Each structure stands twice: as C-alpha cells, then as structure tokens.
Amino acid sequence: MADAAGETVAETERLILRDWRDGDWAPFWTGTNTPAVMRWLGGVADAEKRQGAQDRLTSYRSEHGHTFWVVERIEDGALLGFCGLKRSNQEGGPIGAMEIGWRLREDAWGQGYAREAAAASLDLAFDRFGAQEVIALTVAGNTASWGLMERLGMRRREDLDFDNAEFDPDSGRIIVYSIARDAWQAERNGTGA
C-alpha cells in the first residue's frame, strides 16, 4: 500500500512531500498537536480526534489519490508537518472542491517551508490531478494562514465563506480563498497580478 510505503509525491529544493508511514504519526502529533499550532484548528486534539484525523488522511489518499502529505525536510529527514490536497468536506462549505491545506510544527514557521510545500501541492493539483480551481480555508484571526494564501496568489472569496465553528468557536465563520489554474500558471511564470 502506498500510504505505508511513504511514496514520494513531490520534491522541492528543501522538502519532500510523501505519503504517510505508520511511524510518522507519533512525531507528527508531538510536533503539531500543541496549543500554538492548533490555535485556529479547534484546539489541541484528544486521542479520539487524532485517530479521526489519521483515518481521514488515509481515506483521502485511497479515495482521491491525494491527501495532506507528510512534509519532510531533505537536510535531516525531519518531519515538519503536512501539506497537500483533499476534497473539501467541512459542513456548510463548498463540498467536493479541491482544497489545499498545511500544518507545520512551530519551529518550522517563518522559514518559507509552508510556501514551498504549498507551491508544490498547487503544481500537483493543476498538473497531475486536473483541478481547474483550488480553495483554501481558514478563519479571519489566522493571519499567517491567509497571508500565505495571498502570497501564493490566492484571492479572497467571500461568496464561499460559511458558518462553521469547528476551528474558531469565537467567530463561527470559515473564510475561503481560491486560485484558478490560469492564475496559478501566471503566478508561477512571474506574470501574476
């Protein structure tokens, strides 16, 4: 099974995006299930939520051929978190749309890893998986997340925002960004807006 083998999906200058191996889960949760990382993701996950997330990530790969892949640093093999693609499945949202997402451990923040992994994931979305548009979800308070979306050339899509308190119970609202295939190609070619 590809998930168990940890098959490489993409490689960038500093990172490998690959399928999950059984041994990845413990370091992933140790690095990312912290108050700071989970601040805008519903809070630190208990064992039941962690298992549910693992089951979903595995099912995305088997059902759609893509998932939120492991992000591994080439230099030292460190597992930094995940980044990748899934089909949007948040209650109230644009169900079935191609969605990009990322989650990196705190000591990997601010070094360009999320942008590097997200760019590779967008390339895969448009080139390998035939997406015409990719969305990204966050909450208004998560300025780092939507800031990265904007740096990737994604544009705010208020028409797709929806009510869902899973990530930020205070606002109860998820905001949406998106980018179309032609806009991503222009961004990659340096001709984006």
Image (spheres, rainbow, N blue to C red):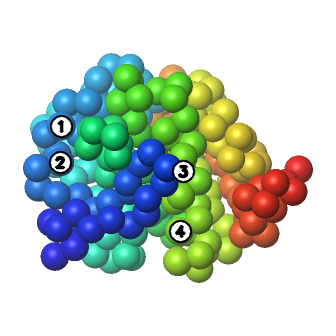
Spatial CA distance of label 1 from label 4 is 25 Å
Between 141 and 164, the one lying in front of the other is 141
Residue 169, above or below 103: above
The residue identified by callout 1 is: 27
Residue 1, above or below 80: below
Spatial CA distance of label 4 from label 3 is 10 Å
Residue 166, above or below 100: above
Label 1 Cα crowd, 10 Å radius (few <14 / some 14-19 / many 20+): some
Label 2 Cα crowd, 10 Å radius (few <14 / some 14-19 / many 20+): some
Residues at marks 2 and 1 touching, judged by CB atoms closer than 8 Å = yes
For badge 4, the amino acid type reads Leu
For badge 2, the amino acid type reads Asp
Residue farthest along the top direction in this orientation = 35
Spatial CA distance of label 2 from label 1 is 6 Å
Spatial CA distance of label 3 from label 2 is 20 Å
For badge 1, the amino acid type reads Pro
- Which secondary structure, mark 2? helix
The residue identified by callout 4 is: 124
- Which secondary structure, mark 1? helix
In screen coordinates, is 86 left or right of 156?
Answer: left
* Place of residue 11 in the rendered image (x, y in percent of width and height, measured from the top left): 43, 59
Q: Is residue 89 visible?
A: no
* Place of residue 110 in the rendered image (x, y in percent of width and height, measured from the top left): 53, 25
Label 4 or label 3, whichever comes before in sequence order: 3
Spatial CA distance of label 2 from label 4 is 22 Å
Quarter occupied by the N terminus: bottom left
The residue identified by callout 2 is: 24
- Which secondary structure, mark 4? helix
Q: Is residue 83 visible?
A: yes
The residue identified by callout 3 is: 118
